[in-house]
């Protein structure tokens, strides 16, 4: 379990999960939603067929610490730059942000795309088959780093 | 710990497995070979849909394909036909599946990405260019917009001079599984079911050799259900369609023989074989006893099988060739009519040509080298398999009774309630989470993932993966623009007004949609018109 103190925010980690585009493969994102909730986090699942802008607006409104995007359509290289951009426009990352939200992406992602995704500003890339426990650890480590 | 050393072994869906099965034990369980097994090709079809099974005719090797523009997919079809494929199956991209044109803002990045992009009847013409429509059996894997895509197909057949009665093929048209399985819905449940029934009604009268619905469990399984749920919800969907067509005034024996089914096949070898056998028996009993079918063809379930993409592992991807081979063997021992073996590289991207060639070879090795095709239902009578078949039927029937209760004795109303209340989705989400926990805890072993040697596993390495060409998106949008510019705007607008009128008057929508696609109206325009009329569906996101 992750304690509120670990995140340094005074509340349990808040995570927003969503699927961008028209992709309907939602098995993974729902397993992750449940696993993060069971690990003591507050999870908001925004659902599927949302735009990067809707995700960023919801992230700002819900004051989340983590944004997790699921893409199994293969469109991650097109969609994630828009996500990074939308988070910056909503003041959740980059210059002017109080503290960057942690941005994660999971899905059918070839190994060769992992580094380019990280370079465009995605903090964590989780290809299909990743254990949920690894994601919990990654979020815990990422948030406690920011809290310091 | 491996699953075989487990002291309390269960099938993947959690059914208990006895230490030993004996013929005597089967007898005392109440199993009656005369009524529970029968002979192949006869009620209750447990042992197979046809008397001689693969001795008479091998299963159809039907690898699904679709990516990029119609031109690119047409080339892949010709490649597959040249390498031993015997039937065609079309994967559509997400914008096509969900009823949006390629230039819609939500379509960005997904045009042609996981399937072929079809916006207009002209695209459909190009997709099957040079392929004889009266010889190749064609499967169109499309659901809420099925009526539109089928109209485009029928329009092209007419233009090429192929009579509709000569067309053999399938349209998936399984609207209900979209809400808990595939999740590429375009409309709310009730109007989507109406369109499904429009296709059944129209084809029964005008395209007599077409399979009007492929009642699908594959996507439900991919969404995380277990074998029992896949079986139960697929049969439940089928019952809702039968009741919907009967409410429309069709007699069950008029349309039931043109319904087909589609299942996934997972890792648990015997449970999967039992699932297929139980499915045939359940369907036969329900069609005869509940719906009063008289023709044996109305009771005989035929199905397509695809090895489940979600069983493919990224680590040591060549091992997926063996997984696919075992799953395919289970499908064949379960008596499938056609088969797709997923590509071993699909945990990374859609399959390469090399992966598809190996999938076809897998099927040919089973058909020609292994001897398993020599006699129908070679495992029939096995004490373990028959016990499992009974257990699966019983567990699936319990779900069906629950859903029937939700509809007060109507499976049509019961399914709409079970979907609307989130019941089905919640059941699947729980099974999916249980499975993930079993994998993460090591209770269920997947080689290369959580076994003691998995540290040695390597990733894709030198695999030659599929390379998607994003210029396909631009090319498709250009094609779409050209069609829009060439058509008569007044004809297009008039045909859309006719669609609205028919939608409001509760008429069959196929005739006005046929007129619209002939006038160059796009899929997105037709589905958009219906969305305006009937509203959109918002996924409840139960987890």
Image: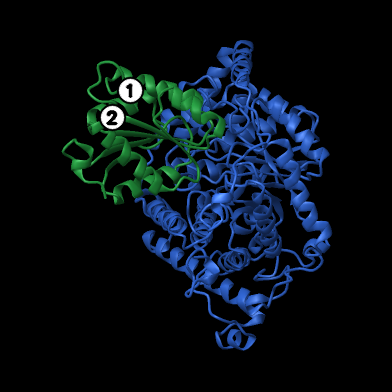
Residue B45 in the figure: left or right of residue B314:
right
**Displayed quadrant of residue B520:** top right
**Residue B197 visible (yes or no):** yes
Question: How far is the residue under mark 1 from the one under mark 2?
Answer: 8 Å
- Which callout, 1 or 2, points at the residue further toward the start of the chain? 2
Write down which chain is painted green. A
Q: Colour of chain B?
A: blue
Residue B353's quadrant in the figure?
A: top right
Q: Mark 1 lies on which chain?
A: A
Q: What secondary structure is found at the residue carrying circle 2? A: helix
| Label 1–label 2 contact, CB within 8 A | yes
Front residue of this view, candidates B247 and B170: B170
Q: Name the residue under label 1.
A: A87
Give percent across and percent down for residue B362: 75, 51
Secondary element at image label 1 = helix
Q: Residue at x 31, y 17 (%)?
A: A89
Residue B455 vertical placement versus B109 (above, below): below
Looking at the image, which residue sits at the far top?
B485
- Is residue A57 or residue B46 the one in the foreground? A57
Kindly identify the residue that appears in the image at 36 percent across and 50 percent down: B422
- Crowd class of label 2 (few under 14; some 14 to 19; many from 20; radius 10 Å): many
What chain does badge 2 belong to? A
What percent of the width, then of the height, locates residue B471? Answer: 62, 18
* A60 relative position to B81: left or right: left
- Please tell me the numbered disc located at residue B232: none
Look at mark 2 in the image and give the residue it sits on. Answer: A59
How many numbered markers are drawn? 2
* Residue B9 in the image, given as x and y percentages of width and height: 50, 72
């Amino acid at each position: 379990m992750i304690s509120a103190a670990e995140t340094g925010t005074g509340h349990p980690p808040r995570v927003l999960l969503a699927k961008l585009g028209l992709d309907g493969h939602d098995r993974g994102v729902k397993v992750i939603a449940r696993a993060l909730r069971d690990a003591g986090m507050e999870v908001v699942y925004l659902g599927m067929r949302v735009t990067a802008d809707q995700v960023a607006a919801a992230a700002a409104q819900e004051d989340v610490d983590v944004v997790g995007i699921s893409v199994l359509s293969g469109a991650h290289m097109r969609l994630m730059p828009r996500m990074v951009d939308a988070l910056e426009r909503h003041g959740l990352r980059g210059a002017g942000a109080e503290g960057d939200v942690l941005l994660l992406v999971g899905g059918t992602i070839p190994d060769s795309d992992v580094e380019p995704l990280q370079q465009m500003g995605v903090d964590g890339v989780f290809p299909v088959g990743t254990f949920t426990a690894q994601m919990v650890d990654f979020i815990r480590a990422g948030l406690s780093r920011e809290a310091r | 710990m491996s699953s075989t050393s487990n002291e309390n072994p269960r099938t993947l869906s959690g059914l208990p497995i006895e230490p030993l099965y004996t013929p005597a034990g089967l007898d005392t369980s109440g199993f009656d070979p005369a009524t529970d097994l029968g002979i192949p090709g006869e009620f209750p079809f447990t042992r197979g849909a046809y008397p001689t099974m693969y001795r008479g005719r091998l299963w159809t090797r039907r690898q699904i394909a679709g990516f990029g523009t119609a031109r690119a997919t047409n080339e892949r079809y010709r490649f597959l036909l040249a390498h031993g494929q015997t039937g065609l199956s079309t994967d559509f991209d997400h914008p096509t599946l969900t009823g949006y044109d390629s230039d819609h803002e939500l379509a960005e990045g997904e045009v042609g990405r996981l399937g072929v992009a079809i916006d207009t009847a002209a695209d459909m013409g190009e997709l099957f260019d040079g392929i004889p429509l009266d010889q190749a059996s064609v499967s169109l894997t499309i659901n809420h917009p099925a009526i539109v895509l089928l109209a485009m197909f029928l329009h092209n057949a007419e233009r090429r001079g192929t009579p509709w009665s000569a067309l053999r093929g399938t349209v998936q048209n399984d609207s209900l599984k979209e809400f808990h399985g595939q999740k590429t819905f375009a409309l709310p449940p009730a109007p989507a079911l109406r369109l499904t029934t429009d296709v059944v009604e129209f084809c029964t009268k005008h395209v007599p050799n077409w399979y009007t619905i492929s009642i699908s469990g594959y996507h439900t399984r991919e969404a995380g259900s277990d074998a029992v749920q896949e079986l139960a919800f697929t049969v439940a969907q089928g019952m809702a369609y039968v009741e919907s067509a009967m409410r429309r005034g069709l007699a069950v024996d008029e349309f039931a023989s043109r319904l087909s089914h589609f299942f996934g096949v997972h890792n648990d070898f015997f449970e999967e074989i039992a699932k297929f056998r139980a499915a045939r028996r359940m369907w036969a009993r329900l069609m005869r006893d509940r719906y009063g079918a008289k023709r044996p063809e109305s009771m005989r379930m035929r199905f397509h099988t695809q090895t489940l993409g979600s069983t493919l592992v990224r680590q040591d991807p060549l091992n997926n060739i063996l997984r696919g081979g075992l799953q395919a063997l289970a499908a064949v021992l379960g008596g499938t009519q056609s088969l797709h073996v997923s590509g071993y590289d699909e945990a990374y991207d859609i399959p390469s040509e090399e992966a598809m060639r190996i999938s076809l070879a897998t099927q040919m090795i089973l058909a020609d080298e292994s001897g398993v095709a020599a006699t129908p239902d070679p495992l029939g009578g096995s004490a373990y398999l028959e016990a499992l078949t009974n257990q699966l039927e019983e567990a699936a029937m319990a779900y069906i009774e629950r859903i029937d209760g939700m509809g007060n004795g109507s499976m049509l109303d019961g399914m709409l309630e079970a979907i609307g209340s989130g019941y089905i989705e919640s059941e699947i989400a729980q099974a999916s989470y249980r499975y993930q926990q079993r994998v993460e805890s090591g209770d269920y072993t997947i080689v290369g993932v959580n076994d003691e040697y998995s540290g040695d596993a390597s990733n894709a390495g030198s695999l030659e993966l599929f390379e998607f060409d994003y210029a396909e998106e631009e090319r498709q949008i250009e094609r779409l623009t050209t069609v829009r510019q060439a058509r008569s705007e007044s004809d297009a607008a008039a045909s859309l007004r006719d669609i609205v009128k028919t939608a409001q008057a509760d008429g069959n929508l196929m005739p006005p949609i046929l007129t619209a696609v002939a006038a160059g109206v796009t899929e997105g325009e037709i589905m958009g018109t219906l969305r305006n009329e009937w509203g959109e569906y918002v996924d409840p996101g139960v987890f």
